[in-house]
Image (cartoon, rainbow, N blue to C red):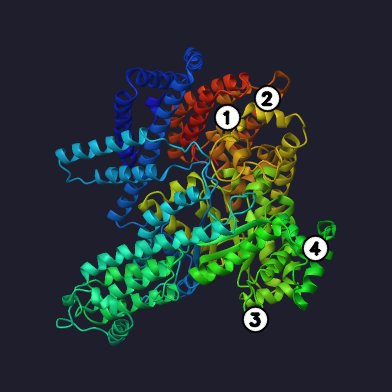
């Protein structure tokens, strides 16, 4: 198909116009900044790539030949040019989502997966308003932002994108004059040009502080702004669906936020007790700055005088109390403002916030005291004709303060179970502690915690660092409030001993309360398929442990369990991983119910499909019945954070979709359990898929070398992408390589192997054992399998075996047979998936995504072919040429921009 044959629906024509406009601006910028030669080089590569895609063999050869003669510095500029184009296209697509959202609102139609749509679906299913209001009391969506991004753009560039997006949104105004439009276009060109002149990625590996700055941008610049409109949208949706019913005075907290940045110690020696303290101090500083700015605005607006309007007595009493306690604030206040109760109250609140930021006397004891002051103003305005004289703005501050407290986002702490084992051994002075059986270690710790911990009998670096972290947790709870610390996550948790070890160390560090209870939720992370399969037994034994049972009773009889998609996929392939997570959820919930403990599932999802990425709302509604009980906690990382939360309207849409899906999944009857037949078929798929995946990746010794030759993993390991190493512990093989670089490397060479390999063998086995009709029926009736196949279909459509074949030329001829196996498996998987879905071609039922991929490929292809040539030259020179490495790093970033969902 020619690009001329690609059709745009009328609703998408504005997107085409935006892309055309931005493309023209990028072209003009390239001519000005890089010269005519660079512009012509880009255009020629693009035209040849398009002709290659349309089947012109000569164009394919010309494109491959043209990149082989480019000098490293020219290659870097060429790649940067294509990358710049993708950045603007990605932004245009997000702005188009804002446009489509506005179209729905303008026509007063519920947007699919929005709050009103979710409520209407529940109403149609026979769920009444009272049941929904009751369900909302326990609904809470908690996105947890993590580091290790495959896209760690500088804050200055993120801000430029925000401004460019606002300019694009502004051009939607039909009343804009030609002169205003020209001025807007010039500002757009300025943002594009200044971004070109800014280094995209730091040359040094980012520090934890750099990662924190990156993540906090989304909190301060986006999420802080959208929280009040989100609650207002929920109130409007409830009124639209039940127009005659009364609403609760205040909706419960439906959204909370978490972060791992500064608390994730798993394999990262740069995270420690100091980063926990400094991270939360920065969180508090920034959120208080946000409150101070908002209070300044309210101070200007709330100019009510007691001579003109009444004031509620509780507010008057609070102001009088503050006047007595803080005479210096009264003295600093203009005399004419002292008879303006709201202005006086705001100045006292600001003084207390300033003291809180500096840990000085006069500070708020906790965020609840600050919220209480806000509510006094809310109630006073509501009772004294203030509904249209400031109440709206004060209620917005209330929503923000209730959501963000003095901590902005709760900081989770994560550590490897092996570190805890070493620390306990050092504490007890038992040299061979790690050689004891898990049962013997658990019994010993259980006895010591029951009798009272002895003083430490040993010392060591691991113990010192570990106890310091628990001490920092205790201090942070006091300084920043109990909600500042999230959960304590144990990676590679294998049994009760691992949870008891965390409890033991917390007590040893003095984290316990006067009663001896440890105010910390301890969460096992089940990461591999075997761990997920053992998870229910692990949980049952933990819940039956007398010492841990006391801890749970003090924590409200609730136990969170984190299920990991990344390592399970890397260990067993996508089908086995997804099915293991699905089964584990159902079995974990059953084990918790049997112990009369509330189960909470925390989903450790990454950006790519192979790491659990995809459309979260559909995934939530495909979970086993009863596994979502009001609370959805899920990690967000990499380029997904920018895609979901980079623009305010998109962040609003993300929150609406996920809260709506969580609400629906929390009401009985809205999700389904797998039938015996469905489970049997999926067992067949998962088993055959896992066997095929492991046979290729782990059971053929030469495959590891093939992977190192076929992909740019050697470049990725040299990149400054995150603050922690690419491999776990000190291993160098595939086993110890972290999931992110593993997935990232396969994405770069366009094979995207972790996102599909093995599924074709699994579907073929299911066809043979259960029949094609059974598979077709399951896809139609079972959300879990439908979502799995939809996610894999997207990966198959994005993969490109013809481009990947160029990378196979980098492989020693003795190992190129691996690529032929991958090609054959790709073809098998495509065919089997299409049969299962009853379709003729990939993405037949998602023409928008199919169009997007077709339009993007010609811009990615030149970067891929350049990367192959640069890899060949760099490796031939012993990987010593820094110019070639710089160009390669640019190619990695550019391809990531083009393909998205890379890590």
Residue at numbered disc 2 = 820
Q: Secondary structure at mark 2?
A: helix
Residue at numbered disc 3 = 515
Residue at numbered disc 4 = 429
Looking at the image, is mark 3 or mark 2 nearer the viewer? 3
How far separated are the C-alphas under marks 1 and 4? 50 Å
Q: Is residue 515 above or below residue 714?
A: below
- Which mark is first along the chain, 2 or 3? 3
Q: Is residue 121 left or right of residue 629?
A: left
Q: Is residue 637 left or right of residue 648?
A: right
Numbered tag placed on residue 749 in the rendering: 1
- Which mark is first along the chain, 4 or 1? 4
- Pinpoint residue 292: horizontal percent, then vertical percent: 32, 65
Residue pictured at 17% horizontal, 44% vertical: 176
Q: Is residue 338 visible?
A: yes
Residue pictured at 31% horizontal, 75% vertical: 348
> For this rendering, which residue is in front, 189 or 858?
189
How far separated are the C-alphas under marks 2 and 1? 15 Å
Q: Is residue 537 visible?
A: no
Asked whether the beta carbons under mark 3 and mark 2 sit within 8 Å of each other, the answer is: no
- Pinpoint residue 59: horizontal percent, then vertical percent: 47, 15
How far separated are the C-alphas under marks 4 and 2? 55 Å
The quarter of the displayed image where residue 22 is located? top left
- Which mark is first along the chain, 1 or 2? 1
Label 4 CA crowd tier, 10 Å (few <14, some 14–19, many 20+): some
Q: Is residue 318 above or below residue 165?
A: below
- Which mark is first along the chain, 4 or 3? 4
Asked whether the beta carbons under mark 2 and mark 1 sit within 8 Å of each other, the answer is: no
Looking at the image, is mark 2 or mark 1 nearer the viewer? 1
């Amino acid at each position: 198909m020619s690009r001329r044959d690609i059709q745009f629906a009328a609703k998408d024509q504005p997107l085409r116009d935006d892309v055309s406009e931005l493309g023209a601006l990028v072209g003009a910028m390239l001519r000005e900044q890089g010269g005519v030669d660079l512009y012509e080089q880009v255009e020629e590569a693009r035209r040849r790539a398009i002709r290659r895609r349309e089947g012109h063999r000569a164009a394919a050869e010309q494109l491959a030949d043209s990149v082989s003669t480019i000098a490293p510095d020219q290659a870097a500029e060429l790649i940067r040019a294509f990358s710049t184009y993708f950045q603007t296209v990605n932004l245009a697509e997000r702005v188009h989502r804002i446009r489509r959202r506005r179209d729905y609102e303008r026509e007063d139609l519920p947007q699919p997966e929005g709050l009103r749509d979710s409520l209407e679906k529940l109403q149609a299913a026979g769920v009444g308003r009272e049941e929904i209001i009751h369900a909302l009391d326990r609904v809470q969506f908690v996105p947890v932002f993590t580091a290790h991004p495959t896209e760690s753009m500088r804050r200055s560039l993120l801000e430029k994108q925000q401004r460019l997006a606002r300019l694009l949104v502004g051009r939607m105004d039909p009343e804009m004059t030609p002169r205003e439009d020209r001025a807007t276009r010039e500002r757009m060109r300025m943002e594009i040009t200044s971004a070109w002149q800014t280094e995209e990625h730091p040359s040094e590996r980012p520090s934890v502080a750099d990662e924190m700055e990156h993540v906090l941008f989304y909190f301060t610049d986006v999420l802080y702004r959208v929280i009040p409109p989100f609650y207002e949208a929920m109130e409007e949706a409830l009124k639209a669906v039940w127009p005659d019913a009364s609403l609760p005075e205040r909706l419960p907290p439906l959204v909370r936020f978490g972060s791992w940045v500064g608390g994730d110690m798993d394999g990262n020696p740069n995270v420690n007790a100091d980063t926990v303290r400094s991270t939360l101090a920065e969180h508090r500083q920034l959120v208080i700055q946000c409150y101070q700015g908002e209070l300044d605005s309210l101070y200007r607006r709330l100019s009510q005088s007691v001579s003109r309007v009444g004031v509620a007595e509780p507010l008057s009493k609070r102001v009088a109390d503050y006047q007595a306690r803080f005479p210096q604030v009264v003295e600093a206040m203009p005399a004419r403002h002292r008879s303006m109760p709201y202005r006086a109250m705001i100045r006292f609140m600001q003084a207390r916030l300033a003291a809180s930021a500096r840990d000085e006397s006069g500070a708020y004891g906790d965020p609840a005291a600050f919220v209480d002051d806000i509510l006094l103003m809310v109630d006073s305005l509501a009772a004294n004709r203030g509904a249209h004289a400031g109440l709206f703005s004060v209620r917005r501050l209330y929503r923000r303060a209730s959501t963000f407290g003095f901590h902005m986002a709760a900081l989770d702490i994560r550590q490897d179970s092996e570190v805890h084992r070493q620390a306990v051994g050092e504490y007890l002075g038992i040299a061979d502690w790690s050689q004891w059986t898990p049962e013997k270690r658990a019994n010993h710790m259980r006895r010591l915690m029951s009798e009272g911990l002895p003083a430490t009998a040993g010392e060591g670096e691991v113990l010192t660092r570990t106890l310091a972290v628990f001490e920092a947790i205790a201090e942070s709870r006091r300084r920043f409030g109990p909600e500042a610390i999230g959960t304590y996550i144990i990676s590679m948790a294998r049994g009760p001993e691992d949870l008891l070890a965390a409890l033991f160390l917390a007590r040893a560090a003095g984290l316990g309360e006067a009663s001896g209870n440890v105010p910390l939720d301890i969460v096992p992370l089940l990461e591999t398929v075997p761990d997920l399969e053992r998870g229910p037994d692990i949980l049952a034994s933990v819940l039956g442990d007398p010492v841990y049972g006391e801890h749970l009773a003090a924590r409200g009889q609730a136990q969170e369990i984190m299920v990991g998609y990344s390592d399970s996929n890397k260990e067993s392939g996508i089908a086995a991983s997804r099915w293991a997570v699905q089964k584990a959820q159902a079995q974990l919930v059953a084990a918790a119910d049997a112990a009369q403990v509330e189960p909470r599932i925390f989903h450790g999802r990454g950006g790519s499909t192979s790491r659990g990425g995809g459309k979260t709302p559909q995934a939530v509604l495909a979970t086993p019945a009863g596994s979502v009980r009001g609370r959805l906690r899920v990690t967000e990382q990499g380029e997904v954070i920018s895609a979901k939360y980079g623009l305010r309207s998109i962040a609003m849409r993300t929150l609406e979709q996920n809260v709506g899906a969580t609400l629906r999944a929390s009401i009985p009857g809205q999700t389904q359990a797998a039938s015996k037949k469905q489970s049997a078929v999926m067992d067949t798929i998962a088993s055959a898929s896992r066997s095929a995946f492991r046979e290729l990746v782990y059971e053929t010794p030469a495959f590891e070398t093939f992977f190192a030759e076929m992909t740019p993993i050697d470049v990725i390991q040299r990149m400054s992408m995150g603050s922690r190493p690419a491999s776990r512990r000190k291993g160098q093989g595939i086993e110890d390589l972290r999931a992110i670089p593993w997935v990232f490397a396969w994405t770069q060479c366009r094979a995207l192997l972790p996102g599909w390999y093995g599924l074709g063998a699994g579907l073929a086995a299911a066809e043979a054992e259960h029949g094609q009709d059974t598979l077709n029926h399951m896809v139609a009736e079972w959300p879990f399998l439908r979502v799995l196949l939809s996610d894999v279909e997207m990966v198959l459509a994005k993969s490109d075996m013809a481009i990947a074949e160029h990378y196979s030329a980098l492989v020693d001829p003795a190992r190129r047979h691996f690529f032929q196996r991958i090609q054959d498996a790709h073809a098998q998987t495509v065919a089997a998936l299409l049969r299962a879905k009853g379709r003729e071609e990939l993405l037949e039922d998602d023409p928008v995504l199919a169009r997007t991929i077709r339009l993007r490929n010609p811009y990615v292809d030149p970067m891929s072919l350049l990367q192959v040539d640069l890899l060949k030259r760099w490796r031939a020179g012993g990987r010593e040429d820094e110019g070639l490495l710089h160009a390669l790093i640019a190619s990695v970033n550019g391809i990531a921009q083009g393909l998205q969902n890379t890590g």
